């Protein structure tokens, strides 16, 4: 399911977390748990992976991660404000040290002029600081958008910890 380069980068991420003695959590929407699946593909990942959350529905983002309903209503699930809240909520409720959150439009439907298919928002939360990134992968196909999201999320975590 995952290519060897991505497995290697994920192994590097887990080794960094082990060296820093920190735990990791994920808050996933459009990837549906694929980031967690990749992380747990690596032997010994249980030393790092704390908990993971798949909050596909807006109601789950609110109920589980504490994303404010008004933010979801006003900004939409695919927004900087929502992924920031997801990343912060995941750390708060899990007790992990660092998180990554993703929310996007994988397609083939759901895109708009403002948020076309392939738009994905990312956030990490670590040491009380939340960083955000938005990628426009394009209409690559649902699987390809999701895989690009997983890869970018792992890269974002590695960069955040280096």
Image (tube, rainbow, N blue to C red):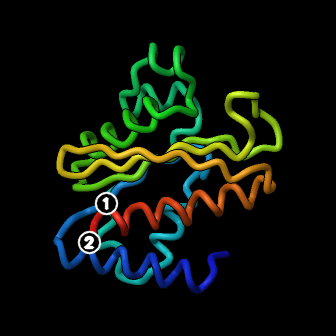
Q: Which structural element holds mark 1?
A: strand
Q: Which mark is residue 24?
A: 1
State left or right for residue 13 relative to residue 4: left
- Residue 144, given in percent of the width and then of the height, sits at 73, 61
Where in the figure is residue 56, as x and y percent of width and height?
58, 38
Q: Do the residues labelled 2 and 1 touch (CB within 8 Å)?
A: yes
Element carrying mark 2: helix
User: What x and y, as percent, mark residue 17?
Assistant: 26, 72
Q: Mark 2 points at which residue?
A: 17
- Residue at 55% from the left image edge and 55% from the top image edge: 33
Which residue is at a point 42% across and 27% down the rendered structure image? 63
Q: Say which of 159 and 50 sits in front.
A: 159
Q: Residue 10 carries which label?
A: none
Q: How far apart are marks 2 and 1 (CA)?
A: 8 Å
Horizontal and vertical percent for residue 118? 70, 47
Give the residue at x 50% y 31%.
60
Q: Earlier in the sequence, mark 2 or mark 1?
A: 2
Can you say whether 76 is above or below 16 in the image? above
| Direction from residue 32 to residue 51 in the image, left or right | left
Residue at 59% of width from left, 57% of height from top?
149
Give whichever of 105, 131 is nearer the camera. Answer: 131
Residue nearest the observer in this picture, 46 or 38: 38
User: Which of the 4 image quarters holds residue 93?
Assistant: top left
């Amino acid at each position: 399911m995952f290519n060897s380069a991505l497995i290697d980068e994920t192994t590097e991420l887990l080794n960094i977390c082990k060296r820093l003695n920190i735990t990791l959590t994920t808050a996933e929407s459009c990837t549906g748990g694929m980031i967690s699946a990749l992380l747990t593909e690596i032997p010994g990942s249980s030393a790092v992976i704390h908990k993971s959350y798949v909050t596909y529905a807006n109601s789950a983002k609110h109920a589980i991660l504490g994303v404010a309903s008004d933010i979801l209503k006003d900004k939409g699930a695919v927004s900087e404000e929502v992924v920031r809240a997801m990343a912060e909520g995941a750390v708060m409720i899990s007790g992990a040290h660092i998180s990554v959150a993703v929310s996007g439009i994988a397609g083939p439907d759901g895109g708009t002029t403002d948020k076309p298919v392939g738009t994905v928002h990312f956030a990490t939360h670590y040491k009380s600081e939340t960083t955000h990134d938005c990628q426009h992968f394009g209409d690559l196909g649902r699987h390809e958008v999701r895989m690009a999201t997983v890869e970018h999320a792992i890269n974002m975590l590695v960069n955040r910890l280096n």
